[in-house]
Amino acid sequence: MTRESRLTVTNEFKLALPKLPRQLEPVPVETLQLHDEQTIEQGLYENGSLSGCKANKVLLEKVHFKHVVFEDMALPGVEITDAIFEHCDLSNVNWSEAIIHRATFLHCKMVGLDLLGSTLRNVRFSECLAEYATLRFANLKQVEIERSSFAHADFYSATLSKIKLEQSNIDKAQFSSTSLNGIDISTCEFHHLGVTMEDLQGCIISAPQAILFTKIFGLVVKNE
């Protein structure tokens, strides 16, 4: 293997998936009574509601939530490891300062989700509705967003590394003070972005998007 090919492999996007037991024991959602610094692990939770629950520094580990409503929940400082959220409602949930590692969100409604100052590692969002989500000052690495809507989402002053953005709506998302260097947004949909030219340095875009950015920045293209 040549030095060049080794570098190619090293820089390849690889997402570590949640490590869950083959079979998780079903646990009734209504049995969960969340309190500060509680640990919840090894369970399959389906068809219930945790809406409005409030606690600090909760640990969720090796869990699978399906059709669970988390709406208006407040779990600041939550730590989530090896978890799947499927067809869940996380609208207006406060997970600020969260640490999320090896987690997958599938077909979830996440409008207004608050991840202010959170750390995300090996996280996948697939076919999620995450409009107006807050990721200000968040640190994201090895994160995949595919076929999802993050329109109006706030990534102000976030740190993005090895991010995969595919076929997603990021219209009017805020990326000011966030470097998009090396990030490919060429398959994403938007008509306007909160971004500066400096933030766009090294960003990978399509030809039609290049034309759109000339309009966003008020540039005039002169035909010779």
Image: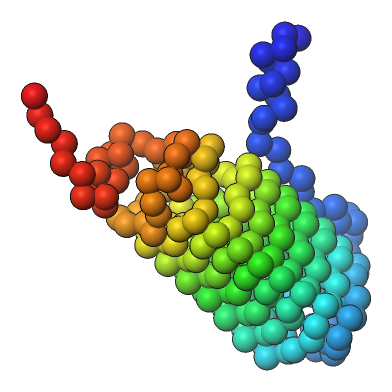
In this view, the residue in front, 117 or 16, is 117
Horizontal side of 15 relative to 33 (left or right) equals left
Q: Nearer the viewer, residue 186 or 167?
A: 186
From the viewer's perspective, tell me whether residue 169 is left or right of residue 210.
Answer: right
- Image-based side of 158 in relation to 56, left or right: left
Question: In this view, which residue lies farthest toward the top?
Answer: 2
Residue depicted at 66% across the width and 31% down the height: 12
Q: From where the camera sits, is residue 144 visible? A: no
Residue 180 point in image, percent of width and height: 50, 45
Look at the picture and state if 39 lies above or below 165.
below
Residue at 53 percent of width and 76 percent of height? 112
Picture residue at 89% right of the left edge, 60% below the top: 23
Label count reads 0
Q: Position of residue 200 (x, y in %)?
A: 43, 44
Q: Looking at the picture, does residue 170 appear above or below residue 45?
A: above
Residue 224: % across, % down: 8, 24
Give the image quarter of residue 36: bottom right
Question: Which quadrant of the view contains residue 35?
Answer: bottom right
**Quick check: 145 left or right of 41?**
left
* Residue at 72 percent of width and 12 percent of height: 3
- Look at the image and tell me in which quarter the N terminus lies: top right
Q: In front here: 99 or 21?
A: 99
Q: Quadrant of residue 138?
A: bottom right
Q: Which residue is more in the foreground, 34 or 210? A: 210
Q: Is residue 143 visible?
A: yes
Percent position (x, y) of residue 129?
Answer: 51, 66
Picture colour scheme:
rainbow
